[in-house]
Image (cartoon, coloured by chain):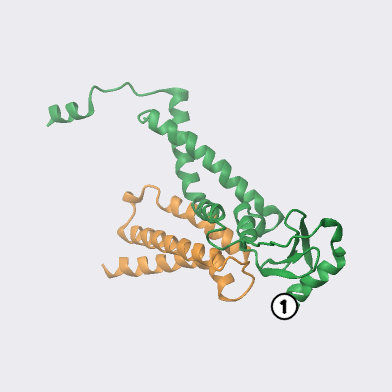
Chain colours: A orange, B green
Amino acid sequence: MIAGLLAGLFLVPVALLWLGHRLRRRTPGARAVFWGATIGHSLGILATLAAVHYPPVLWTQGWRAVAVHWSMVAGALLGAAVGAAAGRAR
Amino acid sequence: MQTTKTARTGPAEPRPKGGRRGWARWMFYSHLWLGVATTGIVLIICITGVLLNHKRPLGLMPEVQNPQAGELGASLPIAELARRAEGAVPAEVAAAGIDRMDVRPGDGFVKVRFDDRAVHEVTVDLATGRVLHAGERNDVFLEKLHSGEIFGDQGILLSDLAAVGLAILVISGYWLWLYPRSRG
């Protein structure tokens, strides 16, 4: 479980930064995926912050543990999928 | 058009060379990459820090009064005080064991903290054994989250990483502000 949290905290942002390098030279579809993943990850951060802090008790199981550990990764993947779909629809 | 552009940007500055340019590029990229990579952990540290600063008004830490504090010499034995505290919490909390007993002779009570996930604490009168308060210590959870201790023994390295990252962000930010054109 902790691997998901660490991936959301560090790996996803670094991957997004790498994807965003020379963004203007990439195809419109790739740009849509990048922005979708960025927005999805940002929303995932908000979900993680809410799940981490409320209630102020250690999360160990259930939906809250899943939200704490996987919101950022899931948000980025979902956002990337939405971005890809939107890019294809254009 | 050319005149307008020159007037806006001022006289052309000589492009920095060699070490200073390389240093400036390092500052720019460390600012960029560290800023993005530490966003989540820094936000957690910021929010927990603000909550801890206001833990009493927010009700995260109980405020217990004991107007009839007795003498320390008249205190009940520690084992008896622990037994009284265990009787004031649910069985699963008592089963988690006692983490620590914080004796306050001036206030005439002992705070018995349990090692459960919600960090329950019972305040017991030293002389009479009367339970003055029983509830959760949410600030302990927030302290562990703030320090990274909640993620295990190695978790404090996350907090260290965020702190070092913030220091480098401040230095590189100042550099980029003071020498905006040095990256070339």
* Residue linked to disc 1: B90
Quarter-of-image position of residue A63: bottom right
Q: Residue at x 35, y 24 (%)?
A: B15
Residue B38 location, x and y as percent?
Answer: 52, 49
Tell which of B88 and B33 is nearer to you.
B88
Identified at 49% across, 34% down, the residue is B171
* Residue B31 visible in the current orientation: yes
Q: Is residue A66 left or right of residue B109?
A: left
Q: Please state which of residues B129 and B149 is positioned toward the viewer in this rendering.
A: B129
Chain ID, mark 1 = B
Amino acid residing under circle 1: Pro
Q: Would residue B73 appear left or right of B56 to someone viewing this image?
A: right
The quadrant in which the C terminus of chain B is found is top left
Residue drawn at (47%, 35%) of the image:
B172
Residue at left offset 72%, top offset 75%: B89
Relative vertical location of residue B91 with respect to residue B108 in this rendering, above or below: below
Q: Position of residue B53 (x, y in %)?
A: 55, 52
Q: Residues within 10 Å of mark 1 (few under 14, many from 20)?
A: few
Q: Secondary structure at mark 1?
A: loop
For residue B96, say whether it is visible. no
**Quarter that holds the N terminus of chain B:** top left
**B71 on left or right of A59:** right
Please tell me in which quadrant of the rendered image residue B116 appears.
bottom right
Residue B71 vs residue B156, the one in the foreground: B71
